[in-house]
Image (spheres, rainbow, N blue to C red):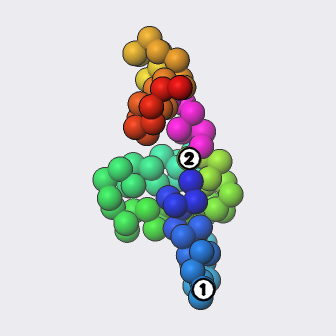
Amino acid sequence: MRKLLPSARRASGSEAAPPPARSGRQGRNLFEAAAVYVAACAENDQDRMDEAVTWVDPGQLTFGVNELACRAVLTLARERNQTPETVARSLLGVKER
């Protein structure tokens, strides 16, 4: 997760820049921000990712991204008639135990 979120990537550098102003929070919820952020990541749209990051606090975005991942894995597991662990491992390219 830390590799995905820009705020976590910046914090790992020696001279981390301050987080962007978060004036765009009004009317946005963490699930909307997570949906936009993850979709933008999938589409490699850095501008949209940066925008979604400003909508909610970093902790809220992390929670929303985690919730989206859980729901996606559960949905795929049902569709594939597999366990959530099997689906998650398959998506990440991790071998079965």
Quarter holding residue 81: top left
> What is the crowding at mark 1: few (fewer than 14 residues within 10 Å), some, or many (at least 20)?
few
Where 51 sits versus 37, above or below? below
> What is the crowding at mark 2: few (fewer than 14 residues within 10 Å), some, or many (at least 20)?
many
Circle 1: residue type: Ser
**Residue tagged by mark 1?**
14
Q: Secondary structure at mark 1?
A: loop
- Residue 53 image point, x, y percent: 53, 64
**Residue tagged by mark 2?**
65
One can see residue 74 in this view: no
Which residue range is magenta in the image?
Answer: 66-74
Q: Is residue 57 left or right of residue 43?
A: right
Total label count?
Answer: 2
- Residue 4 image point, x, y percent: 50, 58
- Residue situated in front as seen by the camera: 85 or 35: 85
Which residue is the extreme one toward the bottom? 15
- Residue 35 image point, x, y percent: 48, 46
Residue contact at pointers 2 and 1, CB within 8 angstroms: no
One can see residue 81 in this view: yes
- Residue 37 image point, x, y percent: 46, 54
